[in-house]
Amino acid sequence: MSIYPAHILSRRGLSTALGPIALTICTPAANANERDWDRASSIARDALVVVAVGLPAVKGDWNGSLQAAGSIGATAGVTWALKETFPETRPDGSDRKSFPSGHTSVAFAAASSLAERQGWDVGIPAHLAAAFVGFARVKADKHHWYDAVVGAAIGEAAGLLITRKPRENIAVIPWGDTRGGGVSFAMRF
């Protein structure tokens, strides 16, 4: 069976393709070093971000793309603020930006957005890929295990709070302009 772009972008096609593609591209060999794990985690994180923002756009769901981008952006901002507030030396000693894992938080925000907007047939493989990112960050000696766990919690929370299906009665909308930014919350009773 040939895999065409239209087949890959269908729900079933994406969930079928995402797992083997992620494992083939991102899993370093048994004798991999920290640099290989670091590279693999970056590839998996970037792929999740592209799919989380791109899949809704390809389907014409611009609100879904905006919500995914908002989830990822909010996660990146919270993660950056925590890194600045609680400087912790990385296990490899390279700098004091270990807590929490930015790669993991962004990967889980993307996975959570996919699960919320596309359903669990896409969300489960996305969450497995996000879990791989956290695992790979620890294997790359860039983070302690708890850095990855906290990063996962931040990303998951942002994805759940900001990404919503269109028929739900709650909206959390990030906004910004040249003077500042914030989050608007609306609920219909």
Image (cartoon, rainbow, N blue to C red):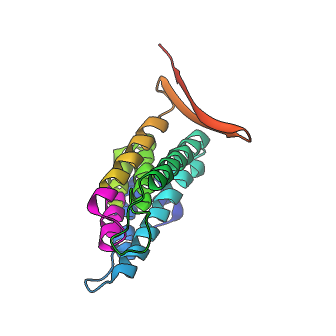
Q: Estimate the x, y position of residue 53 in percent, counting from the top left.
A: 55, 52
Where residue 142 appears, x then y in whole percent?
Answer: 37, 70
Is residue 57 highlighted in magenta? no
Measuring from the top left, give residue 74's x and y in whole percent. Answer: 52, 45
79 and 72: which is toward the camera: 79
Q: Residue at x 30, y 65 (%)?
A: 135
What residue span does the magenta drawing correspond to? 130-148
The quarter holding residue 90 reads: bottom left
Of residues 1 and 68, the one drawn nearer to the viewer in this rendering = 68
For the residue pair 54 and 66, the one nearer the viewer reads as: 66
| Residue 85 visible in the picture | yes
Number of marks in picture? 0
Height in image: 185 above or below 188? Answer: below
Residue 2 position by quadrant: bottom left
Q: Quadrant of the N terminus?
A: bottom left
Q: Is residue 171 left or right of residue 39?
A: right
Main SS class of the magenta portion in the image: helix
Up-down relation of residue 19 to residue 79 (above or below): below
Q: Is residue 109 left or right of residue 178?
A: left
Identified at 33% across, 75% down, the residue is 27
Establish if 88 lies above or below 167.
Answer: below
